[in-house]
Amino acid sequence: MAAKKTIEEKNASNREIISERIRQMGEKLVAQIDAKDNPSLKIPVRGSSNVFYDEKGKKIVLGDKVARRYMFNVAHSRRFMQTMLVASYVKKDLLANNLTATLRDLYYAKKHTIKNSRENTIEEQKESDTAIVDLEVSLETFRERLHLRAEPKGRMAGDMTVLDRVRDKVDSIDLSRMGSGGWAVPSIVEQIEFKDVGVEYVLVAEKNAIFDRLNEDGYWKKNKCLLMTTAGQAARGARRLMQRLTEELNLPAYCLTDADPYGWYIYSTMKYGSMALAHESDRLGCPKLKFLGVSTSDIEHYKLNDVTIKAKDLDIKRAQEMKEYDWFKAKEWQREIDKFLDKKLKAEIQALSSKNLQYISNTYLPEKISAQDFLP
Amino acid sequence: MAAKKTIEEKNASNREIISERIRQMGEKLVAQIDAKDNPSLKIPVRGSSNVFYDEKGKKIVLGDKVARRYMFNVAHSRRFMQTMLVASYVKKDLLANNLTATLRDLYYAKKHTIKNSRENTIEEQKESDTAIVDLEVSLETFRERLHLRAEPKGRMAGDMTVLDRVRDKVDSIDLSRMGSGGWAVPSIVEQIEFKDVGVEYVLVAEKNAIFDRLNEDGYWKKNKCLLMTTAGQAARGARRLMQRLTEELNLPAYCLTDADPYGWYIYSTMKYGSMALAHESDRLGCPKLKFLGVSTSDIEHYKLNDVTIKAKDLDIKRAQEMKEYDWFKAKEWQREIDKFLDKKLKAEIQALSSKNLQYISNTYLPEKISAQDFLP
């Protein structure tokens, strides 16, 4: 019962904190109005001119450029109004009632025709989405704390229990008893607490098929790992959970993708964040994550040449671009990318099945992990 | 422990049955070779000339046209060989070892260059995929019983326990304690057993967002339903599970999609099967499923006009095609499609959020279900 209390208290306190920040934002605006100033909001700039790679923190972050958005400015007023609509929805509809909603729900809820006009508050969802990001960054928080949900994706299993709260109900979920399905990673993971942690590292695979293979082989049990699949590009919930697992529990984490630029991209987004979401890297990045494979060197070492795929022009082009990114400048990655550009061959994780179905569980992963053969 | 035995016995017996069918198929071929006949396989025709709508069984099925595939026939021999490769992999690699694999694993495992030739056994995965379907239909079974996995998708929650087996480990999973994530529906659900069924119907939503909304509102608890989302077009595992829930437990099932031709298509595939997979409708169809909404009449009745979306030309074209399908000939569906073609307006489930976030849980669903206001 102690844990239940903690989870509920944490949630209540988060709601109060965010509500209070919104209230203060509103109060400042009212004070500006009372002083007959033009009401304005300070919003960090999110364009590429304000995006940097933080070498030490290993994340793609926003710089400190800030813009002011004014209510009485023809170029600003529509977005100003939309940011207010979002703030009001978050405070009064979501936080006050302890409810969560999707970006789409918010769009439907706040879209209407302004009285005595033919103007809609919001035309397209991308307008309210932008206003949500404006609010996130100006409140120095992220959307999950505003009780906004994204599309969930991913599954997990391992010797660990999570406590998860849905409103006033707290469930204790034993991730070692999830059968062949696994536990579905939720959209919002802020409320989750970890208990009875019997794992020594996290293994995250980009593919459902690999989760199924390793789960069937009892890999996570034998190797004391927490197994997760992101089912493609990682969703926000899975990324945040990876961060919490590696930071709060101090667990090492290894990533398993196809040997191609798309696999590297999935890995780098999970680890460093992305240019487009640089304002989120603090909350979603996972700097401790390492790239286990499949690497281009694995193709030679594990004699996978017969089951490679010829790289397409687009793959080559992406690899050339990625070679220039600051977060791929480590010499190990430069070598990896050069090798790819030289051979022009890709390999899928499932190429290991050409040896035998359990080769990945019995040979490949144990060898790589015991040799600590990772890319940074 | 009794249940554990049952699940394991069931699995062992399925493996024996399928192995035996493959053995018999092989024996027939050997007998043909011994008799100096041209070895051949009987394979049901899957083209549109052999696809029918079974009005009584409410499913799209194959007729009884059968073709013979010969080993010594230039047009057949490659596919004949591939079907043999698949049969051998299923029997010796999968069933004998009690392992499951994906279609991609099988492709990688059986692709190789034929000795003393420059010919590959399999060039593209679609060749082995076709050979798998050939084997499925000629053995009168479906791929999950051959231990072949598909991509899993979907989540569930409700007052029910499932027993799920992963090789020799049996987990008892209480679906009422899955937090905000839910249990991830696996690829293969043959081994699952239902226990402590405290639900009166199944509610399946096409969207993750609706699962999250209803789960947060405790809808499944208050209304004694099993809640599932297919996260888009339903995966095989989710479809088969829907069938088993409605047939074995005799539960009614209601489907919740957007009000548009794509929503109708998701519904009809779950219920009747599809033309392309007519050979699977017996195992994947769910004839008891009913369409709860959102319907075009709901747009008027619930005054959603302000939050509709204009139908695109492609939507109109699809609606016109669907109007002609045998399985949409019921007068209720003809009226629904006509109304759509008349108004040319679509509505998303989330349009209900324009009333208030919990309108769907507190008003829309209870009203529709208590009035039994469904389309057939």
Image (cartoon, coloured by chain):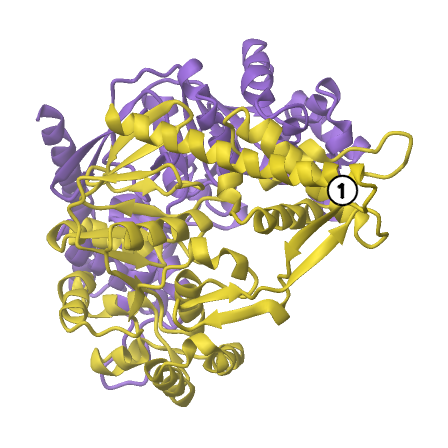
Chain colours: A purple, B yellow
Q: Establish if A309 lies above or below A75.
A: above
- Residue B349 in view (yes/no): yes
Question: What residue is drawn where x is 49% and y is 36%?
Answer: B17
Query: Could you say whether the residue bearing mark 1 is in a helix, strand or loop?
Result: helix
What is the chain letter for disc 1?
B
Question: What residue is drawn where x is 32% and y is 77%?
Answer: A120
Q: In the picture provided, is A362 more to the left or to the right than A76?
A: right
Q: In the picture provided, is A148 more to the left or to the right than A339?
A: left
Give the residue number, with chain letter if any, for mark 1: B32
Residue A119 percent across, percent down from the top left? 33, 80
Residue A27 percent across, percent down from the top left? 16, 54
Front position in the image: B238 or B3: B3
Front position in the image: A49 or A372: A372
Front position in the image: A262 or B267: B267
Question: Tag 1: residue type?
Answer: Gln
Front position in the image: A7 or A170: A170
Residue A247 percent across, percent down from the top left? 36, 23
Q: How many marks?
A: 1
Residue B260 percent across, percent down from the top left? 40, 74
- Choose top left, top right, bottom left or bottom right for residue A311: top right
Question: Quadrant where the C terminus of chain A lies?
Answer: top right
- Residue A311 in view (yes/no): no
Question: What residue is drawn where x is 78% and y is 33%?
Answer: B112
